[in-house]
Amino acid sequence: MLRNDQYRIEENKIILKGLGVIGRIEVEYKGLVHLKGRQGRLEIHYDPDERRWYAYISFEVYEKAVRGVWGKVPQTPKGDLKAGVDIGVNNLFAVYVENGVSLLVNGRPLKSISHYWRVGIAKYQSVINKYGIKSSRKLRLMYSKWRREVKSFINAQVRKLVEWLYESRISVIYVGYPKNIAQENGNFNTVQVWSYGYLLRRLNEVSEEYGISIIFVDEMYTSSSCPIHENGCGRRITRGLFKCAKLNKVFNADIAAAYNILIKGISITPSPIGIGVTGWRPSPGLNEADVAPNLPALATPRTLVL
């Protein structure tokens, strides 16, 4: 670990200095530096499985390059709309904006990635177990590649979502926080495939880049409650669908959940202590009557699918 005055970056080299009797070392690196700002500490680690050295530098970021285009960080939201976001497995994100526009982001490729590696790892592990071997470099590399592919997909979809929110003039998003999974009640899909902890962290970090505030609310009952009525008039009729018995109308259950999260978020705001759901207090803003007239958008082609 080196202080920020013990190294500098020049072109494709990291120059280490102030190393006592060693003096100075120049190290070439691969990759692009996509951040500008005040550099922090430098940490260098060796991965024995990858057989590579990695350098990690902390930044107080002022500018960031996204697909080769530099922009200041954080940006200023283009509007002041609010949106509810429901996170799931088949639909990675379901979004409902207070103006009636909704969005679905497909999460099935993430399931395919994880199930592909799960099968491959199980087959290889059964082979080495015959020889009394519980682990190997190849097995660890398979796990590592699995996690990298999962994180790569999550990063791409999170950035795509936040860019859409930014262009849609949204300044605040209310995200359903999966409290039950946080209490270690998850299964393979929710923990290994979904990687909810990493997903929520990346959603928070990327939203911050675009100046979008993110508030986590308890998602309990949001996917099983009627988005129009409060007296339990509806129910889930099949996976992905919710039916209101009074109107005899079917909604996408994830979009309905996103709508309910939005309603819940604009009426209660979490304590700044953290991500939990304690310390609620009334919040100024929209009320249910302001959003309900837009609800028919749930059942129209205005729902976008990515």
Image: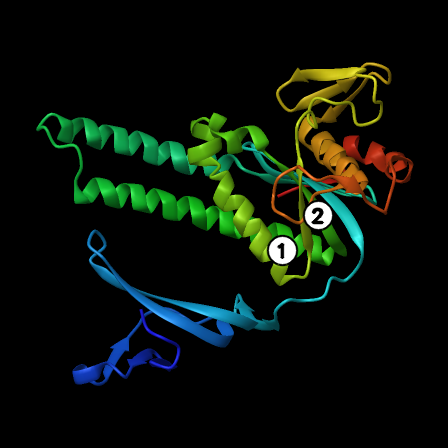
Does any portion of residue 186 appear in the rendered image? Answer: no
> Local crowd at mark 2 within 10 Å, few (<14), some, or many (≥20)?
many
| Residue pictured at 84% horizontal, 32% vertical | 296
Secondary structure category for the residue under label 1: helix
- Residue 304 in the image: x percent, y percent? 70, 42
The C terminus is located in which quarter? top right
Q: Residue furthest left?
A: 131
Name which quarter of the figure residue 74 lies in: bottom right
Q: Amino acid at mark 1?
A: Ser
Q: Residue at x 37, y 68 (%)?
A: 31
Mark 2 falls on what kind of element? strand
Disc on res. 173: 2
Whether tag 1 and tag 2 are in contact, CB under 8 A, the answer is: yes
In the image: residue 159, left or right of residue 115: right
Q: Inspect this view and state whether residue 5 appears.
A: yes
Q: Is residue 118 left or right of residue 83?
A: left
Q: Vertical placement of 116 versus 32: above or below?
A: above
Name the mark on residue 207.
Answer: 1
Per the rendering, the mark at residue 159 is: none
How far apart are the alpha carbons under marks 1 and 2? 9 Å
| Residue 183 coordinates in the image, percent (x, y) | 51, 30
